[in-house]
Image (spheres, rainbow, N blue to C red):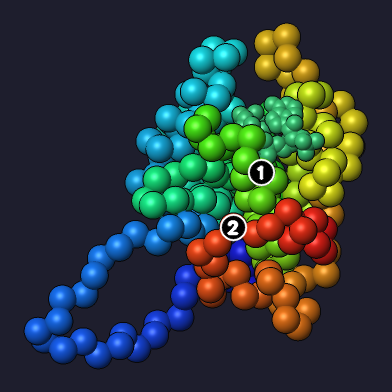
């Protein structure tokens, strides 16, 4: 099955509960949900990026057109954390087909690759330092285990973030071949093994069909990683 074909986020059609004609249905936004992003989310994504990166270093990992590009080509490799209708954190990934990252990986999606290149993880400024980044990353990595083709996830990060990613189970691969101006990066790897659909009673099995409305606890965070 192709990664695209897997579409584990998409819920099977369910019969709607019958509603008496006279009864108005309440339209309330879920308190918290995780879902794949689409091109309509691109502006919200970029607003978070702009604050997180452009205001700090003058540039950002993905420009708006690149955000749209990846959300068009491989939306199933993105994940957004939405609270009351507002994007509070996100991950954007694409597929890559080599052992190590090269500059091509910054712009290309290789549908036959078995490596997910995590381009960016960012949390809205207002919601940082609340554990959301690690929780979203954990959910994303669990989700990847549901995609049969995926064997590993890689990313490049500034050295200061190496401990952050180590805590989520990433290992250092070494210095990344990609540089941006004078910036250098560490390349990190997460082995995506033991596909979740093989495991009974797994959170990763339940998640795609039943997006939880409550964030996981810190204890859940490192379970199974
Ligand atoms: C990095 C980021 C995703 C962390 O998410 P978060 O929800 O704020 O994370 P938390 O505050 O729960 O911190 C988790 C851990 O990461 C560390 N951490 C957070 N931001 C960090 C940073 N910029 N540099 C180094 N360590 C950082 C925290 O100290 C904490 O460590 P601890 O577990 O030892 O206490 C978030 O700060 C962010 O979006 N930053 C801007 C974008 C960015 O730099 N993204 C990563 C590169 S793509």
Mark yes or no: residue 114 visible.
no
State whether residue 15 is above or below residue 93. below
Q: Position of residue 72 (x, y in %)?
A: 44, 49
Pinpoint residue 95: horizontal percent, then vertical percent: 65, 50
Residue that numbered label 2 is attached to: 215
**Quarter holding residue 68:** top left
Instruction: Confirm or reject: label 1 Cβ below 8 Å from ligand 1.
Output: yes
Question: What residue is disc 1 on?
Answer: 131
Disc nearer the start of the sequence (2/1): 1
| Residue at x 90%, y 31% (from the top left corner) | 174
Q: Which mark is residue 16?
A: none
**95 sits left or right of 98 in the view:** left
Residue 26 position (above or below residue 74): below
Q: Are marks 2 and 1 in contact (CB under 8 Å)?
A: yes
Residue located 89% across and 37% down the image: 173
Which quadrant holds the N terminus?
A: bottom right
Label 2 Cα neighbours within 10 Å, binned few <14 / some 14-19 / many ≥20: some
Q: Residue at x 77, y 58 (%)?
A: 219
């Amino acid at each position: 099955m192709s990664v695209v074909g897997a579409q584990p986020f998409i819920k099977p059609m369910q019969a709607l509960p019958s509603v008496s004609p006279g009864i108005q249905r309440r339209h309330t936004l879920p308190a918290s949900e995780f879902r794949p992003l689409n091109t309509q989310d691109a502006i919200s994504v970029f607003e978070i990026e702009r604050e997180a990166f452009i205001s700090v270093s003058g540039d950002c990992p993905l420009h708006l057109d690149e955000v749209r590009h990846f959300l068009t080509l491989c939306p199933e490799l993105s994940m957004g954390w939405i609270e009351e209708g507002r994007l509070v954190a996100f991950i954007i990934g694409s597929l890559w087909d080599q052992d190590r990252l090269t500059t091509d990986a910054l712009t290309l999606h290789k549908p036959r690759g078995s490596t997910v290149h995590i381009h960016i993880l960012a949390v809205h400024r207002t919601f940082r330092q609340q554990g959301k980044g690690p929780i979203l990353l954990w959910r994303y990595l669990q989700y990847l285990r549901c995609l049969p083709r995926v064997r590993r996830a890689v990313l490049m990060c500034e050295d200061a973030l190496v401990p952050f990613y180590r805590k989520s189970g990433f290992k250092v691969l070494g210095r990344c071949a990609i540089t941006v101006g004078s910036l250098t990066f560490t390349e990190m790897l997460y082995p995506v093994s033991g596909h979740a659909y093989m495991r009974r009673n797994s959170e990763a099995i339940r998640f795609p069909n039943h997006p939880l409305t409550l964030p996981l606890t810190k204890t859940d965070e490192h379970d199974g990683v």
